[in-house]
Image: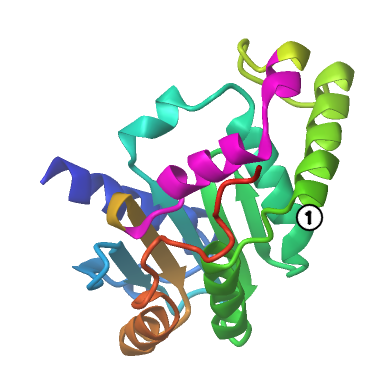
Amino acid sequence: MKFLKNLFVIALLLVSAQITKAQSAAMKDPVSFKLKNGLTVVLAENTGTQKVYATLNSEAEQISNAKAGAQEVLNTMLNSTSGVSGLSFDDKGIHIAANSTDFNNILTALSDQIQTPALTQNAFEAALNTVNTSLQKKDRYYAPNVTAAALQALTLNDIKAFYSVAVHPAAAYLTIAGNIKEADMKTLVKKSLDNWNGVSPDLTPSK
């Protein structure tokens, strides 16, 4: 399957910098499975590194139809409220980069963040200001449709609507590669994400 092959490639790329320093036998063939909520997981054990890398991506087609700037504002909100070193959010997904001894705690933090995100009006306004300032400074790339006017038109409800599509297990896949046993990876992933249903209690529309 082409899609699964692409996932394997992603898993390998996650640790490409580390593999160059390790024996080729240290990297095991990736394996994949699905959680009961539909999340596709790809695991690649690599004992040639002390790190573990993970990326959670979405394949939801509706993302491309989201309002301009919604993804940038959401990522800024999640990054600002995460408070966890080694956990980050950007337009390519949610990322973990950790020592193998810290991976469990950071995966748990990722689970908490995506299941009960702090999508509040205050966080929205702060993130909107941050993105708008960055846009004016041109300190990173933004798609042509992400303009000051587009940001001004966004509401918290737009962010919540985008979140409900972009961060949903049935349309997502998680790739993990690094120095952690396959059996341990499976146990941690199931413990942290098996009960994630994509619905968060604070996603009720704002009035």
| Spot occupied by residue 53 in the image (x, y as percentages of width and height) | 52, 65
User: Which residue is at a point 45% across and 48% down the rendered structure image?
Assistant: 164
Number of marks = 1
Instruction: Determine whether, in the image, residue 50 is placed left or right of residue 181.
Output: right
Q: State the scheme by which the image is colored.
A: rainbow
Above or below 153: residue 57 = below
Most extreme residue toward the front is 207
Amino acid type, callout 1: Ser
- Name the residue beneath numbered marker 1: 80
Q: Residues within 10 Å of mark 1 (few under 14, many from 20)?
A: some
What secondary structure characterizes most of the magenta part? helix
Instruction: Determine whether, in the image, residue 57 is placed left or right of residue 21.
Output: left
Range shown magenta: 150-169
| Spot occupied by residue 142 in the image (x, y as percentages of width and height) | 67, 21
User: Which residue is at a point 36% across and 67% down the rendered structure image?
Assistant: 197
Above or below 124: residue 129 = above
Above or below 136: residue 140 = below
Is residue 165 covered in magenta?
Answer: yes
| Spot occupied by residue 143 in the image (x, y as percentages of width and height) | 61, 17
User: Which residue is at a point 61% across and 65% down the rendered structure image?
Assistant: 97
On the image, which quarter does residue 157 sit in?
top right
| Spot occupied by residue 69 in the image (x, y as percentages of width and height) | 64, 26
Circle 1: element type? helix
